[in-house]
């Protein structure tokens, strides 16, 4: 059962039948900017608490507690909303320190735990924190260029769906890291590797929502025609469920992780307008499914292999996927707000 956000109580409720889709509900929240800001503001404190709690418990970098929350908070700040700058900066430093500890392994082509997924997401985190290219990022780029260099894409052998296990995700985060942090000497090799990956991205068939999302992202980094991007975009839009959300797989129900990742990809990779009916419906789903504490709860389907620890984010054994889902949901909604060039609001 969904808990409706308190900020929605006084808002008008709309009922709309979308072209090509069945009328999915008679009561859906109006995703106005004021509503979205209220939803995003409520999600921020527990995202910050969770990423700080994870850094307190573990020295290692994680995609779910560092990368995706950092990406989210960086975008939230651009929309003029207040974040805890100290906690944000600490996550960038935490990520950089993790990579520094692994520099020798990166230079040796071994990498750290999580291999390409971890390395790519860590570079994405540094990018969002404004970290400059340095000897450490050079070593990570070296690893990405040397690891599995004979293969036509980067493969990930993890089995912790949805975020760990997709070759499309591994390939995208690697391409992004190379494009962002490759130095002048590495550029020719990066160009050749990108060309090598292109054919796989064009021909490979995605099996689930994570695959479709990151294939779309990956296509933006390779030479391809508009038709291919349009087809990849249509595949995502066509998989939207009647409730307005997206599911991780065809047999599952909609959740905030899948919905958030799809909306961010549609808005940023495919550049569809914020007024598109699928975006509006997806935003309504996320607003309606936010819990009273400001989070979104998604049940894990990954088999645990590490010792359990509490990060101070809610939902117990589901907290890792739930903080990732809450971050993606918040990030998607933040992208519906205009960027603000004036003074950022101060924390309360």
Image (cartoon, helix red, strand yellow):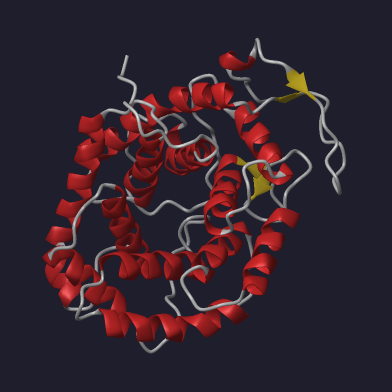
Task: Name the quarter where the N terminus is drawn.
Answer: top right
Q: Is residue 261 visible?
A: yes
Q: Which residue is painted at 40% across and 64% down in the image?
A: 173
Q: Which residue is painted at 64% across and 28% down in the image?
A: 31
The image quadrant of residue 84 is: top left
Vertical position of residue 172 compared to residue 268: above or below: below
Q: Is residue 148 visible?
A: no
Q: Which residue is painted at 48% across and 28% down in the image?
A: 40
Pinpoint residue 6: horizontal percent, then vertical percent.
58, 14
Q: Nearer the viewer, residue 70 or 253?
A: 70
Q: Nearer the viewer, residue 309 or 198?
A: 198
Q: Is residue 283 left or right of residue 61?
A: right
Q: Which residue is painted at 14% across and 63% down in the image?
A: 134
Task: Name the quarter where the C terminus is drawn.
Answer: top left
The image quadrant of residue 196 is: bottom left
Vertical position of residue 169 compared to residue 205: above or below: above
């Amino acid at each position: 059962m969904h808990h409706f956000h308190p900020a929605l109580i006084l808002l008008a409720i709309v009922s709309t039948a979308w072209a090509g889709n069945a009328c999915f509900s008679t009561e859906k929240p109006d995703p106005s900017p004021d509503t979205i800001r209220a939803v995003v503001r409520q999600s921020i404190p527990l995202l910050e608490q969770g990423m700080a709690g994870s850094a307190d418990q573990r020295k290692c970098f994680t995609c779910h507690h560092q990368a995706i929350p950092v990406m989210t908070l960086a975008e939230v700040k651009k929309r003029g909303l207040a974040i805890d700058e100290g906690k944000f900066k600490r996550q960038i430093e935490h990520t950089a320190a993790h990579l520094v500890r692994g520099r020798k392994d990166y230079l040796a082509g071994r990498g750290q735990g999580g291999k390409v997924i971890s390395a790519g997401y860590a570079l994405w985190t540094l990018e969002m924190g404004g970290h400059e290219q340095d000897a450490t990022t050079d070593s990570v780029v070296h690893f990405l260029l040397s690891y599995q260099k004979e293969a036509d894409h980067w493969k990930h052998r993890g089995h912790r769906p949805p975020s760990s296990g997709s070759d499309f995700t591994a390939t995208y985060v690697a391409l992004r890291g190379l494009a962002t942090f490759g130095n002048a000497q590495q550029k020719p090799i990066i160009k050749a590797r990108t060309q090598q990956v292109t054919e796989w991205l064009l021909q490979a068939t995605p099996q689930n929502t994570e695959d479709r999302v990151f294939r779309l992202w990956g296509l933006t980094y390779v030479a391809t025609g508009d038709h291919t991007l349009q087809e990849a975009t249509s595949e995502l839009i066509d998989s939207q469920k009647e409730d307005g959300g997206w599911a991780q797989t065809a047999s599952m129900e909609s959740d905030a992780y899948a919905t958030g990742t799809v909306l961010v990809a549609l808005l940023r990779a495919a550049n569809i307008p914020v007024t598109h009916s699928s975006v509006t419906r997806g935003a309504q789903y996320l607003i309606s499914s936010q819990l009273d504490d400001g989070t979104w709860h998604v049940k894990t389907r990954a088999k645990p292999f590490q010792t359990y620890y509490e990060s101070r984010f809610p939902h117990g054994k589901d907290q890792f996927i739930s903080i990732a889902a809450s971050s993606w949901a918040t990030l998607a909604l933040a992208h519906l707000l205009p960027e603000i060039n004036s003074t950022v609001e101060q924390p309360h």
